[in-house]
Image: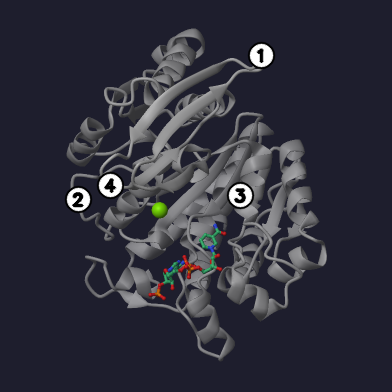
């Protein structure tokens, strides 16, 4: 069988622990037998990041901006325990945060739906994609305790030294707390562009919501930036594509989302996205079925699984156990990256392979062969729990049949 050819390479970022084990199996068993794979490989495993003073992460992000497409394995974000475990030179930052900052991107998370894995809200028959703004607000806030009798003020000093000064609160009777947060036009605009473009690319409606009735300057500014960018640059293309941009208040959005059948992209401010993405992931079943793509307004796409390195399973795997970790989100990271590469390079065969790979995964699960996390929740009768290795082999068999 002739392998499917690629034109441009994609960036392959390897990672850690159980997902690193799955990563090489996916590449070897599900991709390389079918595709003449062209990749530029970066090892973002904990040891390699430490050895390179994290330069390997930044280099991978730079190459992603140049080549346009990357696929990333889950990686350890070191904490104090990890510094000890690996004897790290320092507590390196989260690779995802480093890459996101360099790509100036927005993360879109969507559940992978399969027959037999029913969402807790039955009417959610189509995926809800959450786009979380990943800069500022409460995540970059300054805050302080205020003693009784103190006064908190918000002061903005202009370049020429002039001031805008507003009282936040006078803590006359009892003390309390105060907080100041910010965002930037550049970041809000990049977020808006990523969302409008991704809606066009995927043919889905875009919803956005804030609390602009209460936050008349801060949240209202988000609403205004989105509205202006939409009117100036996207309204015509949305009409042509038959999709809609819909703005509403955040509490109204939450109520409407629960009543909906899904199928939209829901753009969320940073905190809303943090909270709502966990809610949406839980309703759809499992973090192991959540795909994730970082979209850069500079024209780069980085695909990954939303879950981490599944340390608990890795410890059992290290002890020789044949574990049943779900590789689906990692496989869909590969199919997503290959499809995007195929689209950018006008290679329909590569796009077709990505579709076939996803179909083979779906067929395997829907025929009752799945990993333990899915077997525990499936509505299919007689489901069988396979190890990760056996599950990947079952997918490969079906994929090979499609290409025979
Ligand atoms: P995790 O790796 O997502 O795993 C948490 C738990 O969720 C697992 O113990 C497992 O539950 C379940 N789970 C997650 N993915 C699964 C899968 N594919 N198949 C089956 N079950 C799955 O989160 P964590 O244990 O909190 O974090 C581990 C490491 O990952 C940390 O070092 C963290 O820094 C890193 N992390 C990386 C990323 C990223 O690179 N994007 C994201 C999050 C976390 P059971 O044990 O109950 O089976
Ligand atoms: Mg969260």
Name the secondary structure under disc 1: loop
Q: CA distance from mark 3 to mark 4?
A: 39 Å
> Mark 4 sits on what residue?
174
Q: Nearer the viewer, mark 1 or mark 3?
A: 1
Name the secondary structure under disc 3: helix
Q: Quadrant of the C terminus?
A: bottom right
Name the secondary structure under disc 2: loop
Q: Nearer the viewer, residue 393 or 238?
A: 238
Q: CA distance from mark 1 to mark 4?
A: 37 Å
**Picture coordinates of residue 64 (x, y %)?**
72, 43
Q: Earlier in the sequence, mark 1 or mark 3?
A: 3
Residue that appears at 26% across and 60% down: 116
Q: Nearer the viewer, mark 1 or mark 4?
A: 4
Q: Earlier in the sequence, mark 1 or mark 4?
A: 1
Q: CA distance from mark 2 to mark 3?
A: 32 Å
> Mark 1 sits on what residue?
160
Q: Is mark 4 within 8 Å of ligand 2?
A: no
Q: CA distance from mark 1 to mark 3?
A: 34 Å
Classed neighbour count for the residue bearing mark 3: other residues with Cα under 10 Å, few (<14), some (14–19), many (≥20): few
> Mark 2 sits on what residue?
121
Query: Which of the 4 quarters of the picture holds residue 263?
Result: top left
Q: CA distance from mark 2 to mark 4?
A: 45 Å
Classed neighbour count for the residue bearing mark 4: other residues with Cα under 10 Å, few (<14), some (14–19), many (≥20): few
């Amino acid at each position: 069988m002739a392998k499917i050819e690629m034109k441009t390479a994609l960036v392959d970022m390897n990672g850690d622990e159980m997902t690193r084990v799955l990563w090489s199996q996916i590449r070897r068993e599900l991709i390389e037998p079918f595709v003449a794979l062209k990749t530029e490989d970066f090892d973002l495993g904990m040891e390699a990041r430490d050895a390179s003073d994290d330069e390997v992460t930044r280099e991978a992000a730079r190459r992603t901006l140049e080549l346009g497409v990357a696929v990333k394995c889950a990686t350890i974000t070191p904490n104090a325990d990890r510094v000890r475990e690996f004897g790290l030179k320092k507590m390196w930052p989260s690779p995802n945060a480093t890459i996101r900052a360099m790509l100036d991107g927005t993360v879109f998370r969507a559940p992978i739906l399969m027959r037999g894995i029913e969402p807790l809200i039955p009417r959610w028959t189509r995926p809800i994609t959450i786009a979380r703004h990943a800069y500022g607000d409460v995540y970059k806030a300054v805050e302080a305790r205020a003693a009784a009798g103190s006064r908190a003020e918000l002061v903005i000093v202009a370049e020429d030294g002039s001031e805008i000064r507003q009282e936040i609160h006078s803590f006359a009777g009892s003390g309390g707390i105060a907080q100041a947060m910010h965002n930037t036009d550049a970041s809000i605009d990049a977020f808006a562009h990523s969302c409008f473009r991704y809606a066009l690319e995927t043919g889905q409606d875009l919803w956005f919501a804030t609390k602009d009735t209460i936050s008349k300057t801060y949240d209202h500014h988000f609403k205004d930036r989105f509205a202006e960018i939409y009117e100036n640059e996207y309204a015509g293309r949305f009409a042509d594509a038959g999709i809609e941009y819909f703005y509403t208040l955040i509490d109204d959005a939450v109520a409407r989302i629960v009543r909906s059948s899904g199928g939209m992209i829901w753009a969320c401010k940073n905190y809303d996205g943090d909270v709502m993405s966990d809610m949406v992931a839980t309703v759809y079943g499992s973090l192991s079925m959540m795909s994730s793509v970082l979209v850069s307004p500079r024209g780069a796409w980085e695909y990954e699984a939303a879950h981490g390195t599944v340390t608990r399973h890795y410890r059992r795997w290290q002890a020789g156990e044949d574990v049943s970790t779900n590789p689906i989100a990692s496989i869909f990271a590969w199919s997503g990256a290959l499809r995007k590469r195929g689209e950018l390079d006008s290679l329909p065969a590569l796009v077709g392979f990505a579709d076939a790979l996803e179909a083979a995964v779906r067929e395997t699960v829907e025929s009752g062969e799945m990993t333990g996390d899915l077997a525990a929740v499936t509505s299919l009768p007689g489901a069988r729990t396979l190890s990760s290795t056996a599950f990947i082999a079952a997918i490969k068999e079906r994929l090979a049949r499609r290409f025979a």
